[in-house]
Image: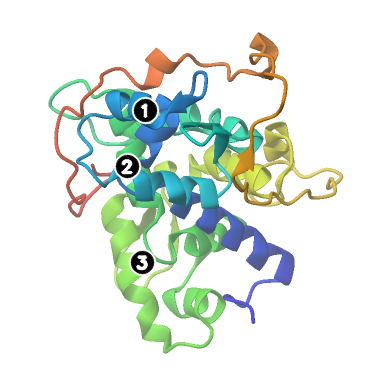
Amino acid sequence: MAVTALPPDTDADIARVTEALAMITPRWTVRILLALSGPPLRYSELGAKVPWLQNGQLHPKLKALCDAGLVERTEHSQRHVTYGHTERGVALLPVLPMIVTWAEEHLEKADRPLPAIEQIEDSLTLLTRRHAAAILWVLKSRQEASGRALARIVMPSSDWTNIYPPLRQLVADGLVDTDGLGLPYRLSAAGDGLGRVLGTLSAWSAGQPLDQASQHPVWGHPQAKPAPRPWTSSQSRSAPTAVPPARTPQSSPAWHKGDLFSHATPARPKAAIPAGGPRR
């Protein structure tokens, strides 16, 4: 059953992007992905790179990333297990600098310079608000819409007044604008600026090359639509008999680990983002 009243392909697109954001938003997830951006690591080696995680916290997060198909667990022997990115995980990494670029341009300025990893975490918190993706999609395609019209599209099976809590939150976050009570809603400059991020996440989640983002029907400039190649989760497997070659520079992401993961321990504990915005 459709989640929204949008056409099935659009509804599926929004659902995939929402799921992709949900994979990487949980606390410490992006930091773990960045810690694994080099050669595969043993559990103890990875733990040394994320020392702020207490005993027992790393294992369930690694399992969730393996279940999502972003990280691969390879058993070389009973006592030798390593963790590294899957092809899908490597393909996701170039999205992270795009989020940093958006945050630097649109999020409110902090009292101190923030590492890029914190820019990413703050941005992801905004993007994973309930119904945020669907509301942003509709406003981008329609330019503006009333609350009642948004409710009919975004949550057709609910009372239409239920649209207002997520709308108020998006206005407070600075992603949506309105001129007053009862007047239409539209994307703010910050909300419209998310086009490259959301278009690229759409391409990634559909298994398409990231440069297909420019052809997205809502967030890009559509041309011929390529056939999707959905990703599948990666399961544990035995190590190959021959050691695989190291990743070549051509297969590595364009950014360097130090560009995003600029310190070993977080500079501040993660807290919920207060209202107002685009806020941290």
Q: Residue at x 35, y 21 (%)?
A: 261
Report the mark closest to the observer, 2 or 3. Answer: 2
Q: Nearer the viewer, residue 277 or 233?
A: 233
Residue 77, position as x, y percentages in the image: 55, 32
Q: The residue under label 1 is which amino acid type? A: Leu
Question: Disc 2 vs disc 1: Cβ atoms closer than 8 Å?
Answer: yes
Residue 102, position as x, y percentages in the image: 42, 33
Q: The residue under label 2 is which amino acid type? A: Leu
190 to 160, vertically: above or below? above
Q: Which mark is residue 167?
A: 3
Label 3: element kind:
helix
Q: Earlier in the sequence, mark 1 or mark 3?
A: 1
69 to 154, vertically: above or below? above
Location of the C terminus by quadrant is top left
Residue 98, position as x, y percentages in the image: 49, 30
Cα distance between the residues tagged 2 and 1: 9 Å
Label 1: element kind:
helix
Furthest residue toward front: 78
Q: Which mark is residue 46?
A: 1
Label 3: how many residues lie within 10 Å, few (<14), some (14-19) or many (20+)? many
Where does label 2 land, which residue? Answer: 58
Cα distance between the residues tagged 1 and 3: 40 Å
Q: The residue under label 3 is which amino acid type? A: Leu
Q: Nearer the viewer, residue 198 or 54?
A: 54
Q: Residue at x 18, y 30 (%)?
A: 110
Cα distance between the residues tagged 2 and 3: 35 Å
Location of the N terminus by quadrant is bottom right
Q: How is the image coloured?
A: rainbow
